[in-house]
């Protein structure tokens, strides 16, 4: 392992110590700055690296400027940001502005132990590591107790979604280190919506090898967390964008499939509700069945249409709603016929196979869906991307 310098094979005599820039997004963190800077200083000074700290503050009005001025450290830079505000914007601006060869990102609230920065830096200097994560879930990593069950579930669910892109143990971590040349790979492509900047970097910088340094994640020292429902929704939007970026058309097909699945749920609900209601009103069984199924098909087709219009094909230029809707219905009708045709054909072939009918029906659904997708793509939502 190299302690200082990035020229791997040269003796340390020839290596120039790399410069480390630490980027910390802040919003109402003035109270934490003295302790943060003290601990960073104590951790970094013995390493021999030149280092600087970039506090990327979204105007907090909490006197952080006075705190920084009173500390009087030349290596601490306060950047008071202008809108658009947000954690992602702040980190990206910091990554662009800071001069370091190694870039470290961490929180201001002392959840991320500054004492581990040298370990992260050392790992980031290894040419084979594209990104280094301070990890709560790597072997040896820990978190302060007292997390509510809901926070655990949230964190796990979010990690699970990230599996679309990476198998690292803690892709949600905001404690990161990387070399500038790796960052450079994605310049201009980084999207600041990401609260989860690590995930953004893994995907866009095409980080194949990601090292995880175990850390102890403390509860925030002072102040309040900004992580709420809004950030969680933003995370889902972020994952969707990353999926589109990485998987292109395939991600669109998957979205279409998910919308279709939601349509199945809607269909089942409506068919149950309508038929129950009609039973209470003493309708005959056949009339009940026919009406309930018809309404269920119409309603689920309509919810599918709107969801696909908003999500799956949300990037297409809109044409007349009526025309789009009618074309969609036409496509679905043909898809239904394809489904019926494939199912009946296969069911005959698989007559003697265990669960043959069900397998045939599944294949029918897949064929119908595929047809619906092509139809929607070619005839319904076909205009050019915005
Ligand atoms: N500039 C700026 N603008 N900074 C912000 C903003 C903003 O709008 N919102 C939050 N920050 C800063 C905070 O001041 C803090 O330094 C850091 O971003 C993290 O915010 P917290 O509010 O402490 O987030 P958290 O504790 O819920 O999230 C932590 O855990 C996540 C994993 O569960 C952070 O470590 C995240 O980075 C991490 O992904
Ligand atoms: Mn925090």
Image (tube, rainbow, N blue to C red):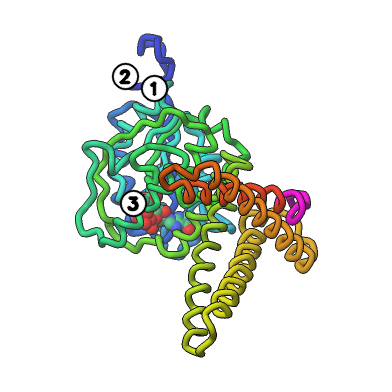
Q: Secondary structure at mark 2?
A: loop
- Say whether residue 89 is visible: no
Q: Residue 156's mark?
A: 3
Vertical placement of residue 221 versus 44, above or below:
below
Question: Mark 1 and mark 2: span between their CA atoms?
Answer: 7 Å
- Say whether residue 23 is visible: yes
Which stretch appears magenta?
377-386
**Cβ–Cβ under 8 Å for marks 3 and 1:** no
Closer-to-camera residue (270/102): 270
**Cβ–Cβ under 8 Å for marks 1 and 2:** yes
Q: Main secondary structure of the magenta part?
A: loop
- Residue drawn 40% across and 34% down? 51
| Magenta-drawn stretch contains 40 | no
- Residue drawn 41% across and 58% down? 64
Quadrant in the rendering for residue 74? top left
Q: Which residue is mark 2?
A: 1
Q: Nearer the viewer, mark 3 or mark 1?
A: 3
Closer-to-camera residue (120/66): 120
Q: Earlier in the sequence, mark 3 or mark 1?
A: 1
């Amino acid at each position: 392992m190299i302690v200082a310098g990035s020229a791997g094979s040269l003796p340390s005599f020839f290596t120039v110590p790399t410069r480390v820039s630490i980027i910390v997004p802040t919003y109402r963190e003035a109270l934490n700055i003295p302790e943060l800077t003290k601990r960073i200083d104590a951790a970094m000074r013995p390493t021999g690296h030149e280092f600087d700290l970039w506090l990327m503050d979204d105007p907090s009005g909490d006197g952080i400027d006075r705190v920084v001025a009173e500390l009087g450290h030349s290596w601490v830079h306060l950047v008071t940001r202008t809108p658009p505000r947000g954690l992602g914007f702040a980190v990206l601006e910091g990554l662009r502005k800071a001069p370091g060869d190694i870039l470290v990102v961490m929180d201001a609230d002392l959840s991320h132990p500054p004492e581990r920065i040298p370990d992260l830096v050392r790992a980031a200097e290894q040419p084979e590591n594209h990104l280094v994560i301070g990890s709560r879930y790597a072997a040896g990593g820990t978190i302060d107790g007292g997390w509510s069950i809901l926070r655990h579930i949230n964190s796990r669910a979010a990690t699970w979604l990230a599996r679309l892109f990476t198998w690292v143990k803690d892709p949600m971590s905001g404690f990161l280190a990387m070399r500038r040349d790796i960052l450079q790979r994605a310049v201009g492509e980084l999207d600041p919506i990401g609260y989860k900047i690590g995930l953004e970097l893994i995907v866009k910088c095409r980080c194949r090898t990601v090292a995880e340094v175990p850390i102890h994640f403390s509860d925030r020292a002072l102040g309040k967390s900004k992580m709420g429902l809004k950030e969680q929704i933003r995370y889902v939007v972020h994952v969707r964008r990353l999926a589109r970026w990485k998987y292109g058309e395939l991600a669109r097909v998957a979205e279409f499939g998910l919308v279709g699945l939601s349509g199945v749920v809607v269909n089942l609900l409506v068919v149950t509700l309508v038929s129950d209601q009609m039973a209470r009103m003493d309708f005959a069984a056949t009339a009940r069945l026919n009406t309930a199924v018809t309404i269920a098909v119409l309603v689920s087709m309509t919810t599918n249409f709107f969801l696909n219009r908003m999500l799956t094909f949300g990037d297409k230029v809109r044409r007349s709603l009526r025309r789009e809707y009618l074309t969609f219905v036409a496509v679905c009708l043909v898809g239904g016929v394809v489904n019926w045709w494939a199912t009946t054909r296969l069911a005959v072939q698989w007559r003697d196979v265990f669960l043959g009918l069900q397998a045939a029906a599944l294949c029918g659904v897949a064929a119908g869906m595929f047809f619906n997708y092509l139809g929607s793509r070619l005839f319904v939502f076909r205009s050019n991307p915005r």
